[in-house]
C-alpha cells in the first residue's frame, strides 16, 4: 500500500500502485506505521509524501464504508489520528501531489507543511457538498488553518470547486507547481533536503508547529506542551 525510501536524511513515503489510494483501514494503518517509523528514526530530518498513478488520494474508501457494518463514521474516526500524526511529526513535511487529491485526500496533502503539485494533471477538490456529506469538525479546522484566504475557503467548501495546480498556487494553497509527476517528487525531495540541512531541533520544530495551529490541535486532540515543559527546554539551552 505504501513504501518508504530513505535518501540521506529525507524519508520518502509513497502510496504505491495505479489505484485511487482511497483511505480505508488498511491504507490508514500503513500510513500511520510509516509515520511512526519516521518519528522513531533519529537520522530522519524531513518527510516527503507522494502517490503513484493518477491519484495522490481520492479520499475515504466509500466502497469499504458501504459494505462494512462499521460505516463511514469509522473511516472519519480513523483518519483523525493520521492527520494528528502529521501535524505533530517532529520534522518538516512536504506533500508531492502527483495526481488528484480529493476530500480526505486533499486533507492528507494540506496537513503537510509544504505542498508541491504537478501542473499538467490533477486537481484539489473537496467533494463533500457534491455528494451530500457534512465536513467533520477537524476537516474544517484544518482547512481554516491552511486556506487563509476567505474567498478561496468559500470556493473550496461552499462551491466544491476543483482547483488545478496553477490556480492552487495563485490562491496560496500550494507552494510550487511542477510540470510532471516525476518533477514534483524531485522538487519536493530537493526542498526536504534543504530543510533537513538546517539541522533544527526536532522537538522544537514540532512544538512551534503545534503553537501555530492551536484550534486544529485541540480538534485533533493533540496534547499541548505544558508551560513547565517549555521552561525546562529553555533551561536546557542555557
Image (cartoon, rainbow, N blue to C red):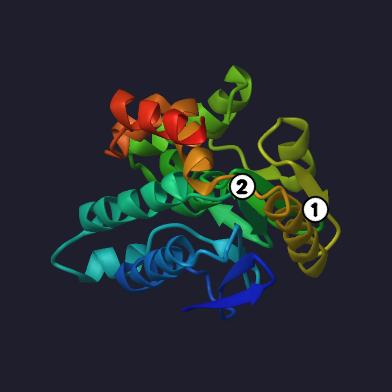
Q: How many marks?
A: 2
Distance between the alpha carbons at the discs numbered 1 and 2: 11 Å
Residue 74 lies, with reference to residue 11, above or below; the image says above
Q: Is residue 159 visible?
A: no
For mark 2, give the secondary structure.
Answer: strand
Residue closest to the eye, 184 or 57: 184
For mark 1, give the secondary structure.
Answer: loop
Q: Residues within 10 Å of mark 1 (few under 14, many from 20)?
A: many
Name the outermost residue toward the right: 179
Residue 216 image offset from top left, x and y in percent: 39, 31
Residue 5 lies, with reference to residue 72, above or below; the image says below
Closer to the chain start, of discs 1 and 2, is 1
Residue 59 image offset from top left, x and y in percent: 45, 57
* Residue shown at the point (43%, 38%) measured from the top left: 129
Name the outermost residue toward the top: 150
* Residue shown at the point (55%, 50%) measured from the top left: 91
Residue closest to the eye, 21 or 182: 182
Residue 167 image offset from top left, x and y in percent: 76, 38
Q: Which mark is residue 144?
A: none
Name the outermost residue toward the front: 238
Q: Which mark is residue 124?
A: 2
Residue 98 lies, with reference to residue 223, above or below; the image says below
Residue 201 is left or right of residue 26, and the answer is right
* Residue shown at the point (62%, 26%) measured from the top left: 152
Residue 2 lies, with reference to residue 126, above or below; the image says below
Residue 32 image offset from top left, x and y in percent: 38, 64
Q: Is residue 104 visible?
A: yes
* Residue shown at the point (30%, 69%) measured from the top left: 25
Give the image quarter of residue 27: bottom left
Q: Which mark is residue 119?
A: 1
Residue 71 is left or right of residue 119, and the answer is left
Amino acid at each position: 500500500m505504501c513504501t518508504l525510501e530513505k535518501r540521506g536524511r529525507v524519508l520518502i513515503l509513497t502510496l504505491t500502485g495505479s489505484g485511487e489510494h482511497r483511505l480505508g483501514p488498511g491504507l490508514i494503518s500503513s500510513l500511520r506505521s510509516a509515520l511512526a517509523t519516521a518519528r522513531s528514526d533519529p537520522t530522519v530530518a524531513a518527510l516527503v509524501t507522494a502517490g503513484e498513478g493518477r491519484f495522490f488520494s481520492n479520499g475515504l474508501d466509500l466502497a469499504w464504508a458501504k459494505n462494512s457494518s462499521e460505516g463511514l463514521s469509522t473511516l472519519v474516526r480513523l483518519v483523525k489520528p493520521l492527520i494528528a500524526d502529521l501535524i505533530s511529526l517532529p520534522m518538516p513535511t512536504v506533500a508531492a501531489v502527483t495526481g488528484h487529491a480529493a476530500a480526505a485526500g486533499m486533507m492528507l496533502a494540506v496537513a503537510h507543511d509544504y505542498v508541491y503539485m504537478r501542473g499538467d494533471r490533477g486537481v484539489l477538490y473537496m467533494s463533500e457538498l457534491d455528494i451530500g456529506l457534512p465536513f467533520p469538525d477537524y476537516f474544517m479546522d484544518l482547512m481554516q488553518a491552511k486556506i487563509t484566504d476567505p474567498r478561496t475557503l468559500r470556493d473550496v467548501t461552499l462551491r466544491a470547486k476543483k482547483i488545478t495546480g496553477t490556480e492552487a498556487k495563485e490562491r496560496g494553497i500550494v507552494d510550487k507547481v511542477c510540470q510532471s509527476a516525476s518533477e514534483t517528487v524531485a522538487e519536493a525531495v530537493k526542498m526536504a533536503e534543504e530543510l533537513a540541512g538546517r539541522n533544527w531541533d526536532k522537538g522544537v520544530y514540532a512544538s512551534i508547529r503545534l503553537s501555530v495551529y492551536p484550534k486544529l490541535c485541540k480538534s485533533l486532540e493533540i496534547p499541548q506542551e505544558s508551560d513547565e515543559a517549555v521552561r525546562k527546554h529553555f533551561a536546557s539551552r542555557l
